[in-house]
Amino acid sequence: MNAAVLTVGDELLAGRTTNTNATWLCRRLNDRGVSVERVTTVPDRTEDIARTVEEYRQAYDAVVVTGGLGPTHDDVTMAAVASALERDLEEHADAIAWLADDGYSRGDLTDGTADLPTGARAIHNEVGVAPGAVLENVYVLPGVPSEMKAMFESVASEFTGTTTYREEIVVDEPESALLDRIAAVRERFDVTVGSYPGGSVRLALESTDEATLEEATTWLRERVDEAE
């Protein structure tokens, strides 16, 4: 399974808000064996969101959208997703019922709070008000981190893939000096290797076979100068 993550918000693009949602979602999807192949941030602009959702939903198994939910003037994500999938927005009965169970009467709710694309499956917001939605392979979640995390966990079982195992070796050698051994371990074993320089060099080995990864890691450790 592969996926794209789409985060929405002018504040993200201006650098006034750190995009922790994207990092968290990528980590959780990776934990479930899902390959995240795209992370994109777009402004609170209907046409930009709709265009990106339409492109990504055809290219990936799942698209996770976060941000821009609610009834205020700049909360346009749900309308944009509806546009991308050529649906209308309508009040969702399940969302209204859940909100009523949480103590919200219709009079308490701003107009549009429970409006979702026609045919969408509502996702209840356990720690907030604005509901999320699933429409085909598009998952729409709030931007508030606590709400996004709780909502994702309620649908996490729908994201499955092949588990990838990972090991890291911290090496006290220049990255350029390691090229021959990186090439050799990749040729000898069915693993991928990432090299991340800094004060030391981190070599990250990954494989879908745990035994192969352990063997490759042991082989490489015997041939590099590990940092203490």
Image: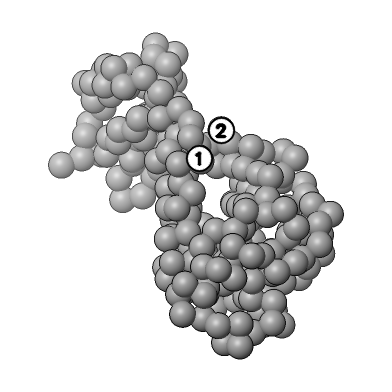
Mark carried by residue 212: none
Give how far across and how far down residue 180 sits, in percent. 41, 21
Answer above or below: position of 30 versus 110.
above
Q: Label 1: which residue?
A: 159
- Image point 34% across, 33% down: which residue? 166
Q: Nearer the viewer, residue 182 or 105?
A: 105
- Image point 69% across, 77% down: which residue? 112
Position of 62 compared to 80: left or right? left
Position of 154 compared to 204: left or right? right
- Image point 31% across, 22% down: which residue? 210
Neighbourhood count class around disc 1 (C-alpha, 10 Å): few under 14, some 14–19, many 20 upward: some
Mark carried by residue 1: 2
What coloring was used for the rendering?
one colour
Pointer 1 with pointer 2, Cβ within 8 A: yes
Q: Rounded to the nearest whole Å, what is the CA distance between mark 1 and mark 2?
A: 8 Å
View extreme (left): residue: 228
Position of 185 compared to 34: left or right? left
Whichever of labels 1 and 2 marks the residue nearer the N terminus, that label is 2
User: Can residue 38 be seen in the rendering of this structure?
Assistant: no
Give how far across and how far down residue 31 sits, in percent. 40, 41
Give how far across and how far down residue 4 sits, in percent. 61, 46
